[in-house]
Amino acid sequence: MDIDRSVLDWLLSGDISIQYQVRRDLLGEDDPRLLARIAEEGWGAGFLARRNADGSWGQRFYQPKWTSSHYTLLDLRTLGLPPDNALARASVHKIAVEEKIGDGGIGPTRTIKLSDVCVNGMFLNYASYFGEPEVSLCSIIDYILGERMADGGFNCWRLRPGAAHSSLHSTLSVLEGIQEYAANGYRYRLAELQSAARTGRDFILDHRLFRSRRTGEIIGPDMLRFVFPPRWKYNVLRSLDYFRTTRTPWDERMSDALDKVVSKRRPDGRWALAAGHPGQVHFVMEKAGQPSRWNTLLALRVLRAYLH
């Protein structure tokens, strides 16, 4: 798929993290010097500068919501901070040591003695990316595999009344974590995780990425809102980018979601940013309602992979 030169130039005029991923994913140029600069300038450096002296961000692991250690590390992983960054690695290890509870997983707060599978999927994602030792991840893996539901997906409300069906939100967070775990060479219970990933992908595809299997109606409007960073929330662009990352072959059940992505392209060849999820942030990367380099990058690499 050809990319308009003016759109490409606009993308390459953005933050260094955008520049690196555009060159890597759209131009086939994986430049380690560009990668290293993510920690030294722009958004990556901005997140690192807000790290507390004890290795945390915000007030604690999960508070306040978007400026906590958890979501800041997830953002740094999404930006593509070099995975050997010593500060990020130390902060991940701090969480692995301090935040586990009795069921082996990690809960959003120490006062709730019940882990959250969505949080653990996100933790597995950035912990694997930043190279946390496998021994620290074993109880996380055990917990995640114990949360797999009969329909093949995951739901953070599984142990609470009324959760008989998996959630697209939780399932995608877990699948992203499994993908990162496998991509970085971890082996503990890998075959079981890969089996869970296959059934999780089928769960998403059986919903055509955003529709009720029973009625065919859209599950919720947020699934078609392209928010970045997505945090824990599901949308079809994030989901399609996961399928691209895993090199999942084209499947007809993706077609509705791809049509929605194409329909949101502006006349200038760019994609806009939907209003973000409410809550305090370290800083605003892009303005809602305006053309978004992040969404444009994600959409272009998805369309390149799947648009025939």
Image (spheres, rainbow, N blue to C red):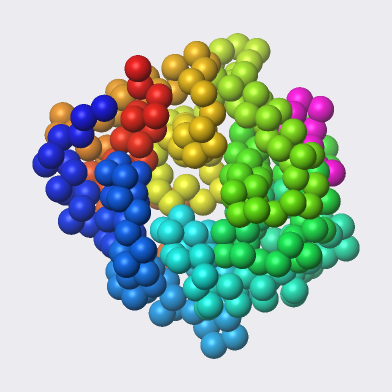
Does the magenta-highlighted stretch encompass residue 149? yes
Q: Residue at x 35, y 28 (%)?
A: 303
Does the magenta-highlighted stretch encompass residue 231? no
Q: Pinpoint residue 121: horizontal percent, then vertical percent.
A: 66, 50
Residue extending furthest toward the left: 6
Q: Quadrant of residue 61?
A: bottom right
Left or right: 284 in relation to 9? right
Q: Residue at x 61, y 54 (%)?
A: 184
Q: Is residue 291 above or below residue 43?
A: above
Q: Is residue 86 above or below residue 229?
A: below
Magenta span: predominant SS is: loop
Count the numbered circles shown: 0
Left or right: 164 in relation to 182? right
Q: Quadrant of residue 63?
A: bottom right
Q: Which quarter of the figure is the C terminus placed in?
A: top left
Closest to the observer: 53 or 113? 53
Q: Residue at x 60, y 11 (%)?
A: 215
Q: Pinpoint residue 122: horizontal percent, then vertical percent.
A: 62, 53
Q: Pinpoint residue 290: horizontal percent, then vertical percent.
A: 23, 46
Residue extending furthest toward the right: 102
Closest to the observer: 244 or 42? 244
Q: Residue at x 82, y 58 (%)?
A: 139
Closest to the observer: 229 or 16? 16
Segment tinted magenta in the rendering: 146-154
Left or right: 115 in relation to 220? right
Q: Let me know if residue 73 appears in the view.
A: yes
Residue extending furthest toward the bottom: 53
Q: Pinpoint residue 224: horizontal percent, then vertical percent.
A: 43, 31
Q: Quadrant of residue 60?
A: bottom right
Q: Let me know if residue 283 appears in the view.
A: no
Q: Which quarter of the figure is the N terminus placed in?
A: top left
